């Protein structure tokens, strides 16, 4: 973790670089929002000193250090904290400019998410989702919507998929039967709901495989799960940015459907027949 690294390097820094380090340690929750020039002004040092400090900490660019700082403090911020730091969108020249900046940030988030994926881990996760006896999917609060999307779509291509929405709901009791032949996929982003962490712990104790969809290795889910996939977010907003997460989940669904294409096709065909029988989809009269 970057804050721990800074603390360890304090005695190796020049006096001016130490001023930067101490400022970051004392103002961790706001330092990641500063440009190099703003950081220099806040520390009463030159911008070059700030850049050299970032280099000393192992970063080729100051912006890379900012990303690590943001990841380190994101989990400590409430939605209200994040709302205050979002800033006034009226500072942009037009509504369209706001849209463009936001969507470009989403693209950068998806690209960073892509770079963090390890193929061998992804292959094992896909295998578990495709072949486990039961698949439990948990997402609480703001993650419930994307958890519902993943679980309901996964039901189209395999059976025994359970969406867990709270620790006191009937669906939570289904985890009492979890075992080594099952798996749980838990989704959580800062601030992390305690219900998600508790549910993950409960299913892991029963021997099930575990996968986390979260923001960084510092996440409480990543510290517990056997494998983690990280959906990165380049912007800080009071509501979670679901674009990189949904992109990642869509890829997982495609890979799982291909793992046993014949079985997935049969399962989806049976679902399709049922939907047609009950007139599930609207059709205009001729």
Image: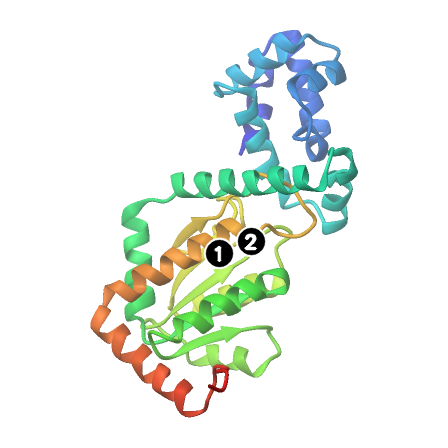
Q: Decide which of 56, 11 is in the foreground and name it.
A: 56
- 5 on left or right of 90: left
- Residue 31 picture quarter: top right
Residue at x 26% of width, y 79% of height: 266
The image position of residue 173, as x and y in percent, is 52, 81
Q: Residue furthest left?
A: 262
Residue at the spot 56% in from the left edge and 83% down from the top edge:
170
Residue drawn at 46 percent across, 89 percent down: 279
The residue lying toward the viewer, choosing from 239 and 99, is 99
Left or right: where 117 falls relative to 237: left
SS at badge 1: helix
What's the image's color scheme?
Answer: rainbow
> Crowdedness of circle 1 by 10 Å Cα count: few (<14), some, many (20+)?
some
Q: Position of residue 265 (x, y in %)?
A: 26, 74
Does residue 206 appear in the picture of this structure?
no
173 w.r.t. 94: above or below: below
Give the x, y percent position of residue 192.
61, 55
Give the CA distance from mark 1 to mark 2. 6 Å
Count all numbered tags in the image, as a single digit: 2
Q: Secondary structure at mark 2?
A: loop
In the image, residue 172 above or below residue 76? below
Q: Residues within 10 Å of mark 2 (few under 14, many from 20)?
A: some
Looking at the image, residue 130 lies above or below residue 93: below
Give yes or no for contact between labels 1 and 2 (Cβ–Cβ under 8 Å): yes
Left or right, 38 with respect to 126, comes to right
Look at mark 2 in the image and give the residue it sits on.
242
Q: Above or below — where is 236 with respect to 174? A: above
Residue plotted at (61% across, 37% down):
101
Q: Which residue is mark 1?
A: 246
Q: Which mark is residue 52?
A: none
């Amino acid at each position: 973790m970057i804050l721990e690294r800074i603390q360890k390097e304090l005695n190796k820094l020049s006096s001016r670089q130490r001023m930067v380090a101490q400022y970051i340690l004392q103002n961790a929750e706001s330092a990641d929002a500063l440009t190099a020039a703003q950081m220099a002004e806040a520390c009463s040092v030159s911008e070059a000193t700030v850049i050299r400090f970032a280099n000393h900490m192992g970063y080729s660019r100051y912006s890379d250090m900012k990303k690590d700082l943001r990841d380190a403090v994101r989990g400590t911020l409430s939605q209200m904290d994040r709302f205050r730091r979002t800033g006034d969108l009226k500072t942009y020249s037009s509504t369209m400019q706001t849209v463009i900046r936001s969507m470009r940030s989403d693209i950068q988030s998806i690209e960073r998410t892509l770079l963090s994926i390890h193929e061998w881990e992804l292959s094992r996760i896909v295998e578990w989702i495709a072949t486990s006896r039961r698949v439990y999917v948990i997402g609480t609060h703001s993650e419930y919507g994307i958890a519902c999307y993943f679980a309901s779509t996964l039901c189209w291509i395999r059976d025994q998929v359970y969406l867990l929405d709270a620790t006191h709901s009937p669906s939570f009791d289904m985890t009492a039967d979890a075992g080594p032949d099952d798996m749980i996929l838990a989704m959580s982003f800062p601030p992390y709901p305690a219900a998600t962490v508790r549910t993950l712990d409960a299913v892991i104790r029963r021997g099930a495989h575990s996968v986390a969809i979260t923001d960084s290795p510092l996440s409480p889910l990543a510290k517990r799960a056997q494998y983690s996939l990280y959906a990165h977010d380049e912007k800080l907003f009071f509501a979670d940015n679901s674009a990189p997460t949904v992109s990642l989940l869509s890829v997982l669904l495609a890979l799982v459907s291909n793992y046993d294409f014949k079985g997935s096709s049969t399962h989806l065909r049976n679902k399709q027949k049922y939907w047609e029988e009950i007139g599930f989809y609207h059709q205009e009269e001729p």
